[in-house]
Image (cartoon, rainbow, N blue to C red):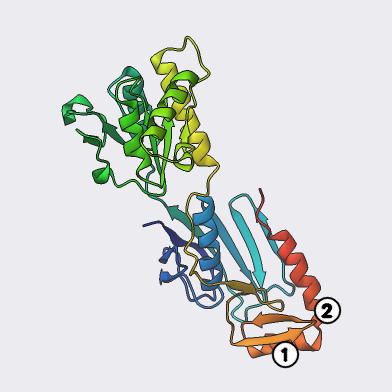
């Protein structure tokens, strides 16, 4: 299950956390463990969800004792100042724990074998699929399937298939792969061969929406070796995968807001709220709410500056 390992790596007293304290944040926003109290836990949960979505680690610097709300975000790093009464500071490192992506390769061709080898080197779990295959036929594969039933491979949200059968049971392999809606499917074939395969699958009853899932990344290459074709096919998989969000965060996860007075991250719905100019603002405590109500425009300027500085870079 995708999650984030949060580790306290530095503290300046007074804090309730200690270096080495750890917690796990799951995709529903829940925290299991200890990384400090109310000043650190909400921001760790919020940033953990961002780390999961981007598939990248984040280092959080929580700086206590600041008089004004200031936040700045760099690549993989967030610094936030808070007027939390404790006055302590700490750094928390957030490391996404993501399962390896699955690469399913159909065929026993040189291109298929090269794909399996390069896929393993690129961080994929590899599954070789070929009728009658035995484990010793594909010694480097994590899983070998002797038929086209992919149930044992359990394709999920981060699963990719390449049909490298080179005319031997292309249609059967594609039909087996397309039966799994979350599986991304590519075919190594020329344009003409790809069109012919689509016609056969359409005659079998597959609709156009399903057939549109078939990509043919190496279809425009002529004269390439089997190894070069495999390289192009894997590059297409890696490129397509990098364009996607690594993990879809659970839609049921909690929402968060920033206290405009002290800068703390507050889980919604907050106990302390107030309305101003038609909007609802949330606070960590009654003191912050009262301070805001006394000088709302001052704190709204600070909140806008903090939100601009903390926007994730693209």
Which comes before the other along the chain, label 1 or label 2? 1
Task: Give the labeled residue for mark 2.
Answer: 297
Residue 238 vs 87, above or below: the answer is above
Q: Residue at x 63, y 78 (%)?
A: 84
Which residue extends farthest top?
A: 223
Q: Secondary structure at mark 1?
A: helix
Quadrant of image for the N terminus: bottom left
Residue 218 vs 53, above or below: the answer is above
Q: Is residue 125 visible?
A: no
Quarter of image, res 103: top left
CA neighbours of label 2 inside 10 A, class few (<14), some (14 to 19), many (20+): few
The answer to which of 56 and 28 lies nearer the viewer is: 28
Q: Secondary structure at mark 2?
A: helix
Task: Give the labeled residue for mark 1.
Answer: 290
User: Mark 1 and mark 2: span between their CA atoms?
Assistant: 13 Å
Q: Residue at x 70, y 81 (%)?
A: 280
281 displayed left or right of 214: right
Across and down, in percent, residue 296 comes to 80, 82
177 displayed left or right of 132: right
Number of marks drawn: 2
The answer to which of 104 and 310 lies nearer the viewer is: 104
Q: Residue at x 59, y 80 (%)?
A: 86
Mark sitting on residue 64? none
Across and down, in percent, residue 312 comes to 65, 55
Residue 123 vs 58, above or below: the answer is above
Q: Is residue 220 visible?
A: yes
134 displayed left or right of 2: left
Across and down, in percent, residue 74 comes to 65, 52
Q: Residue at x 31, y 38 (%)?
A: 176
């Amino acid at each position: 299950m995708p999650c984030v390992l949060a580790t306290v790596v530095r503290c300046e007293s007074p804090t309730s956390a200690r270096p080495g304290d750890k917690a796990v944040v799951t995709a529903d926003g829940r925290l299991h463990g200890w990384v400090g109290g109310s000043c650190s836990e909400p921001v760790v949960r919020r940033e953990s969800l961002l780390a999961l979505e981007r598939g990248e680690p984040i280092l959080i610097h929580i700086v206590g004792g600041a008089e004004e709300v200031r936040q700045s975000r760099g690549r993989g790093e967030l610094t936030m100042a808070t007027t939390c009464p404790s006055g302590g500071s700490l750094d928390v490192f957030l490391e996404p724990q993501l399962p390896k992506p699955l690469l399913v390769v159909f065929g026993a061709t040189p291109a298929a074998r090269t794909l399996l080898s390069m896929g393993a080197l690129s961080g994929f779990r590899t599954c070789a699929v070929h009728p009658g295959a035995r484990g010793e036929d594909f010694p480097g594969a994590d899983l070998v399937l002797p038929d086209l039933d992919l149930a044992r491979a359990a394709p999920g949200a981060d699963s990719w298939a390449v049909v490298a059968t080179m005319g031997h049971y292309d249609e059967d392999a594609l039909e087996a792969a397309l039966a799994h809606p979350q599986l991304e499917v590519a075919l190594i074939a020329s344009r003409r061969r790809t069109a012919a395969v689509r016609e056969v699958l359409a005659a079998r009853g597959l609709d156009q929406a399903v057939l549109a899932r078939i990509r043919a990344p190496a279809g425009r290459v002529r004269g390439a070796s089997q190894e070069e074709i495999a390289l192009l096919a894997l590059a297409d998989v890696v490129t397509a995968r990098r364009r996607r969000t690594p993990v879809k965060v659970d839609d049921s996860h909690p929402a968060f807001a920033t206290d405009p007075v002290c800068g703390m991250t507050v889980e919604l719905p907050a106990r302390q709220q107030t309305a101003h100019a038609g909007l609802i603002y949330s606070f960590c405590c009654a003191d912050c709410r009262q301070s805001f109500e006394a000088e709302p425009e001052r704190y709204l300027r600070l909140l806008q500056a903090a939100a601009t500085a903390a926007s994730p870079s693209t």
